[in-house]
Image (cartoon, grey):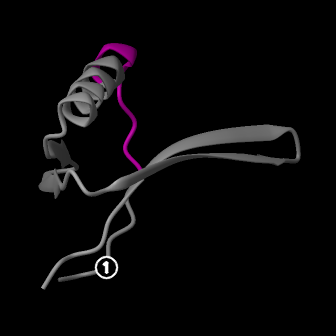
Amino acid sequence: MFDRDIEKAYSNSEFVDKLRRLADSIESGENFEIQIAGERIYVPDRATFNIEHERGDGDHEIEFQIKWQDQD
């Protein structure tokens, strides 16, 4: 599999829809599926979640991160 680093902008309504679907998946303990820039991603229920805040030169960035490792 190839390395990938993509940042995709969404409208407010698209972002809200994705967050709601993610929250429902987390709450129900189910896997989450999302398509980003043409690639379908399957997030397992074992994934971990964190929130990151970066600040520098007057800019701020908050990232909601979902992390997991492939299983053999």
- Name the image quarter holding residue 4: bottom left
- Name the image quarter holding residue 29: top left
Q: Residue at x 52, y 48 (%)?
A: 50
Give the crowd class for mark 1: few <14, some 14-19, many >=20 residues within 10 Å: few
Is 66 in front, or is 2? 66
In the rendered structure, the answer to whether residue 17 lies left or right of residue 57 reads left
- The correct choice, above or below, for 3 with respect to 38 in the image is below
Q: Residue at x 17, y 43 (%)?
A: 34
Residue 8 in magenta stretch: yes
In the rendered structure, the answer to whether residue 55 lies left or right of residue 36 reads right
Q: Residue at x 87, y 38 (%)?
A: 58
Q: Residue at x 88, y 47 (%)?
A: 57
For the record, the magenta segment spans 7-14
What's the residue type where badge 1 is placed? Asp
- Name the image quarter holding residue 59: top right
Image quadrant where one finds the N terminus: bottom left
The location of residue 61, given as percent across then percent down, is: 66, 41
What is the magenta segment's predominant secondary structure?
A: loop
- The correct choice, above or below, for 38 with respect to 4 in the image is above
- The correct choice, above or below, for 70 with respect to 6 in the image is below
Residue that lies at the very extreme toward the right in this rendered image: 57
The location of residue 44, given as percent across then percent down, is: 18, 55
In the rendered structure, the answer to whether residue 48 lies left or right of residue 22 reads right
Is 28 in front, or is 5? 28
Q: How many marks?
A: 1
The location of residue 48, given as percent across then percent down, is: 39, 54
In the structure shown, which secondary structural element does the residue marked by tag 1 occupy? loop
- The correct choice, above or below, for 68 with respect to 22 in the image is below
Query: Which residue is labeled 1 in the image?
Result: 3
The location of residue 72, given as percent across then percent down, is: 12, 85
